[in-house]
Amino acid sequence: MDPRRAAFQVLRDLEEGPAHLDTILSRRLSQAPARERAFASHLVFSVLRNREYLDHLLAAYLDRPPHKLDRPVLAVLRLGAAEAALMSTPDHAVVDSAVELAKATPARRGRKLVNAVLRQVTESWREVPLPPDGKDPAARLAVEYSHPAWMVGELLAQWPRAQVEAWLKANQKQPPLTLRVNLDKVSRVELAKRLKAKAEKVEPHLLTPEALMLIKPGIPAAKLPGFSQGLFSMQDAAAQAMGHLLEVGPGMDVADICAGTGGKTGHLAGIMAGRGRLLAVDPSPGRITALKANLARLEVTGVEVRQGDARELVGVTGVLDRVLVDAPCTGLGVAGRRPDVRWRRNPTDPERLAVLQLELASKAADLIKPGGAMLYCTCTVTQAENQGVVSELLAQRPELRLEWPHGLAAILKTHIGEDGFFRTFPHKDQADAFFAARLVKVSGS
């Protein structure tokens, strides 16, 4: 396998379809030898984590903005610029390899441009200045840390610049692999011992009692000992916190109405200890298939799975104790772990998605009984999708109030801000950026 060509194909796949980065990497690289797979993956992540900066470099040597180039040519140029500026590839090898890659791909018609531009890049990329740090800090930070300027502006509107810069900087680093230990089968201490030799470091994450971090694991997560036996799931610590924030317990009637592939569903089932009713709903046939497979691997039973739109859910109105709304969102909170998300969203997406999110949250309010609670959460950072949705819901539904469990773990309480909302931050928590609000239906309403 030619790792540069494989990296090129992954980047093109991301541009041409909706598949997740992990899915594409698995499809393109799973059968490759370990060394080639590692190099190709490194190339892909180098481009995705630094795309805005690489385009800034390339623009200094082009007679048009990079986005106006043919997409295959731009992919080759980005890969070459990444090797020149971010890796230890010798200059002559950067140029020669990129030209050969262009010849072997749909970028072949641009091979002369690739040759000319990358020769200049290798000679003088260090002399290309960043945008001035003056009237437009979002533009500077967007290039320096390779995030869309509109996303940077969204963060600067909510948080001090120093915090935003620390956040963006954290997103540029490879995050730890975080597992959710299946405590029904193994303790966190025991699993850590089993996995000790498979990573540079294995240590507990403090946010939840099930979370275990692997720093620089040597093999893919699905090949770690214990995966096929259901001893753990791959789940970010912030995502694990959602199950605890909802405060479910054995014997309750609970629904996860945006269940996805079942990460949080499996966690809720574990907390409920197999007692009570747990309903998982998702509209996607593919995600439902994956959800069932994940529950089977974990040996979780008793979950009622329904494929469909939760907004049309019938038969459970006003009778549930708890409802989880892990709403479809822009996903910008996972931009460190999945850097492709940065480039798949545009400034109109938050307002568009907020309409759906509010409908789902309102449906959840219908499903819970008086005294029951719902948790609205997202893995994104925009005001429209987070506090905007919750504020509108509270305005429309006076029977709801923002309320957290009295027995909430101290570590989780520290993440509830002055505005009453729960948040995690990559630069503080070694976790994705999550937002959550727990809303209780007033008894007698």
Image (spheres, rainbow, N blue to C red):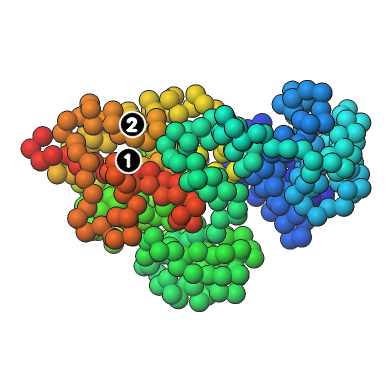
Residue type at mark 1 is Tyr
What x and y, as percent, mark residue 175?
Answer: 56, 55
Q: Is residue 411 above or below residue 22?
A: below
Q: Give whichever of 170, 356 is nearer the camera.
A: 170
58 horizontally vs 144: left or right: right
Q: Give whichever of 249, 333 is nearer the camera.
A: 333
Q: Give whichever of 210, 136 is nearer the camera.
A: 136
32 horizontally vs 291: left or right: right
- Point out which mark residue 389 bears: 2
Res 314 quadrant in image: top left
Q: Quadrant of the C terminus?
A: top left
According to the picture, the residue beneath numbered tag 1 turns out to be 376
What x and y, as percent, mark residue 324?
Answer: 31, 44
Residue 351 appears in the figure = yes
Pointer 1 local density, CA inside 10 Å: few below 14, some 14–19, many at least 20: many
Asked if labels 2 and 1 touch by Cβ distance under 8 angstroms, the answer is yes
Going 23% across and 31% down the picture, which residue do you hit? 394
What x and y, as percent, mark residue 194?
Answer: 52, 75
Going 54% across and 30% down the picture, which residue do you hit? 150
What x and y, as percent, mark residue 188?
Answer: 42, 71
Pointer 2 local density, CA inside 10 Å: few below 14, some 14–19, many at least 20: many
Residue 223 appears in the figure = no
Q: CA distance from mark 1 to mark 2?
A: 9 Å
Q: Secondary structure at mark 2?
A: helix
261 horizontally vs 75: left or right: left
Residue type at mark 2 is Val
